[in-house]
Image (spheres, rainbow, N blue to C red):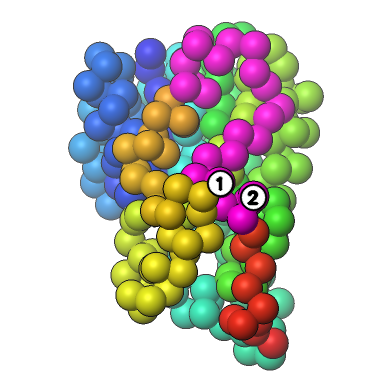
Amino acid sequence: MKILVTGANGGIGSALVQLAKSRGDYVVGVSRTPSTAHVTYQCDVLEVSCLSRAAAEVGQLDGIAALHGHGDAALWNKGLEELTADDFVEVYKVDVAGAFNVVKAFRKNLKPTSSLVFVSSTPGLVGDVYGLPYAAAKGAIVALVKSLAKILAPVRVNAVAFGPIETRWTQWIAAEEVEEFKSRTLLRRMGTPAEAAEAIYWLLSPASSYVTGQVIVVDGGETLVGLYRPTRSRT
Ligand SMILES: NC(=O)c1ccc[n+]([C@@H]2O[C@H](COP(=O)([O-])OP(=O)(O)OC[C@H]3O[C@@H](n4cnc5c(N)ncnc54)[C@H](OP(=O)(O)O)[C@@H]3O)[C@@H](O)[C@H]2O)c1
C-alpha cells in the first residue's frame, strides 16, 4: 500500500509508520517535524498550500491516516471556569478543520478502493471531566467521519476511538493519575502505540474492505468501566 500519515512523528503516528514500513508499504509522512516515513512533508495541517504541494507530488494513495492532534497539557488541565471559547476554537481548528484540510488537499489522490482513517477518542463518545475542548473536537470527528463516508463512497472512511494509549501525554499527569487511567480500563493498563497502530492499519488495509462510516473503539474496555470520576469532577 502507499499511505499518507499525518502526525507521522507522534506516538501513534510513528508506530504506524514503523508497522507499515515493516510490512513493505510506502509511507508518506506529514508532520511539522521530520519523521521516519519514506518521505516527510513538513506541513502544518492548517497550511493548505503546503498540503497542496505535497498532494501534487505524492501520486495515488491507498490510504490516509489523519493522526495529528492538538495536544496541550495546559488546555487539558483547565477546568470549566478557566476555559475560554478560544480554547475550543484552537483545538477544533487543528483536530477537525485540519482533518478537513487533509481530505480536501488529497482528495484527487484517492482511488475508489482507498481508505481514510481518523482518530476520535473515548471522551468524544462518552464525555470526560478533563480536556473539554478535546472531548468536543473528538466528538466532531465522529460526525465528520460519518458524513465523509456518505460523501466519498466508495472510498471508505472510518475512525478509531482510542482509550488511553501510552504516548507523550502521560508525562503531563502525575503518576497516580496514570494509575487511575489504567484502572478505568477492564485490562487495567494503557494501550501501546503499536496496538493502536494495528487497529489503524486494519482499517487502512483491504482486510476491512466492507467497513465504512464506523468508529472502532480500541480502549481496553474503558468505555464499559466508565470515564466519569465523581471524586475528580472539575468545575
Ligand atoms: N494517546 C492517546 O491516549 C490518545 C487517545 C485518543 C486519541 N488520541 C489521538 O490520536 C492522535 C495521535 O495521538 P498521539 O498520542 O500519538 O499524540 P502525539 O504524540 O502528540 O502526536 C500528535 C502529532 O500531531 C502533530 N501535530 C500537532 N499539531 C499539528 C498541526 N497543526 N499540523 C500538523 N501536525 C500537527 C504533532 O507532530 P509535529 O509536532 O511533528 O507536527 C504530533 O506529533 C491524536 O489525534 C490524539 O488526539 C490519542
Mark 1 burial class by Cα count in 10 Å: few <14, some 14-19, many 20+: some
155, above or below 196, in the image: above
Q: Is residue 213 left or right of residue 183?
A: right
The residue lying furthest to the bottom in this view is 81
For residue 216, say whether it is visible: yes
Which part of the image, by quadrant, shows the N terminus?
top left
Q: Amino acid at mark 2?
A: Leu
In space, the residues marked 1 and 2 are separated at their CA atoms by 5 Å
In which quadrant of the rendered view does residue 79 lie? bottom right
Identified at 35% across, 54% down, the residue is: 166
At mark 2, the secondary structure is helix
Q: Which mark is residue 152?
A: none
Q: Which mark is residue 221?
A: 1
In which quadrant of the rendered view does residue 192 lie? top left
At mark 1, the secondary structure is loop
For residue 133, say whether it is visible: no
Residue nearest the observer in this picture, 26 or 73: 73
Q: In the rendered structure, which segment of residues is drawn in magenta? A: 202-225
- Is the residue under label 2 in contact with that under label 1 (CB below 8 Å)? yes
Residue nearest the observer in this picture, 193 or 54: 193
35, above or below 177, in the image: above
Which residue is labeled 2 in the image? 224
User: How many labels were placed on the picture?
Assistant: 2
Percent coordinates x, y for residue 82 in the rendering: 63, 89
36, above or below 124, in the image: above
Which part of the image, by quadrant, shows the C terminus?
bottom right
- The answer to whether the beta carbon of the residue marked 1 is less than 8 Å from any atom of ligand 1 is no
Percent coordinates x, y for residue 100 in the rendering: 63, 42
Mark 2 burial class by Cα count in 10 Å: few <14, some 14-19, many 20+: few
Percent coordinates x, y for residue 211 in the rendering: 64, 18
Residue nearest the observer in this picture, 151 or 76: 76
